[in-house]
Image (cartoon, rainbow, N blue to C red):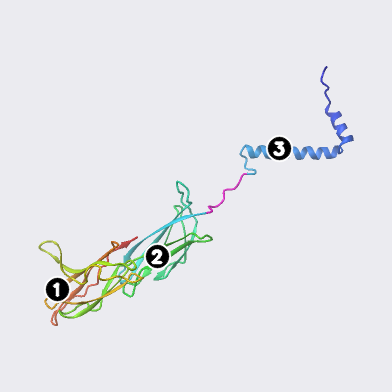
Amino acid sequence: MKPRVMSFRKLTSLLSARVVGFPALIVWAVGFLGALALVCAAVSGGGVFRQPVAAASSYCMSTGYTVDEQADGTFSATVFFFVNDCAFPPQPAPGVVIDVTTDFGTLAASSVTTDANGKAQVTLRLPGVPPGGIAHVTGTIRGTTVSQTTNVATAVVWWSNRYPHPGQTITFQGSGFFPNEALTTFTYGHWDATAKREVIDGVIAPPYAVTTDARGRFQVNWTVPLTQAIGVYDIYVAGANGDGFGACCVEVSNATLTATRRRPAPAKRSG
């Protein structure tokens, strides 16, 4: 038996008479063909129905800093923020706004934006004399709870009398060390031009006898020995966590000695 073939005209006539009418059929056909075209476009990569790339829902951030002494005796710290997408391998996150705060010193800006490499930086000015301490600089990615705090240390050691006489008591103050840190070294010495090395002349405080406070500061009184020779002495301070400081600090003199004043030279610190 041959299969029966219905002509298109008969089909349209039948649908027009028994279903919804010919105009409705035309509307239905156009809608069906349009939907089919959209599906084909999506499958072929035409962009229709393509899911947009969402912004990163989470970020990972790390920090660092460098510190340099300025000519006026203050310190200028540069605090760095590095932001990525937390993926593996991580990709830089550009255009991320970071709100910055500090509890010590003055920030050049209250917010910074990451560059194409996911990096941003801000300048922090710190005083160069006690009472100083560690600045807790916090960066928070705007609109998120992602936050990172870095402790910017300035490692300053100061004195109450730059030119003490033998037998006099002077006070050393320090800041920029770790909080509640024991000092393992607190000595003084001088440069031996013949041996071309530093020679330790004495101890200002025994190891672990001095501990910094909650802001990394300390204060120590020292009586210059009566037998101490006239001259310039370097002060060496080091903490149990490995941070250290060395400066040309005091010049033991007598009433007739004319001395040339020199500022201490704090070591550069980076974190």
Q: Choose the circle earlier in sequence order: 2 or 3.
A: 3
Q: Residue at x 35, y 67 (%)?
A: 76
271 to 264, vertically: above or below: above
* Amino acid type for the residue under numbered disc 1: Gly
* Amino acid type for the residue under numbered disc 3: Leu
Quadrant of residue 79 within the rendered picture: bottom left
Quadrant of residue 126 within the rendered picture: bottom left
Q: Which range is magenta?
A: 50-57
Of the 4 image quadrants, the one containing the C terminus is: bottom left
146 to 43, vertically: above or below: below
Crowdedness near tag 1: few (<14), some (14–19) or many (≥20) residues, C-alpha within 10 Å: some
Disc 1 target residue: 231
Of the 4 image quadrants, the one containing the N terminus is: top right
Residue 139 at x, y percent in the picture: 45, 62
Alpha carbon of mark 1 to alpha carbon of mark 3: how far?
95 Å
Left or right of 63 on screen, residue 181: left
What kind of element bears circle 3?
helix
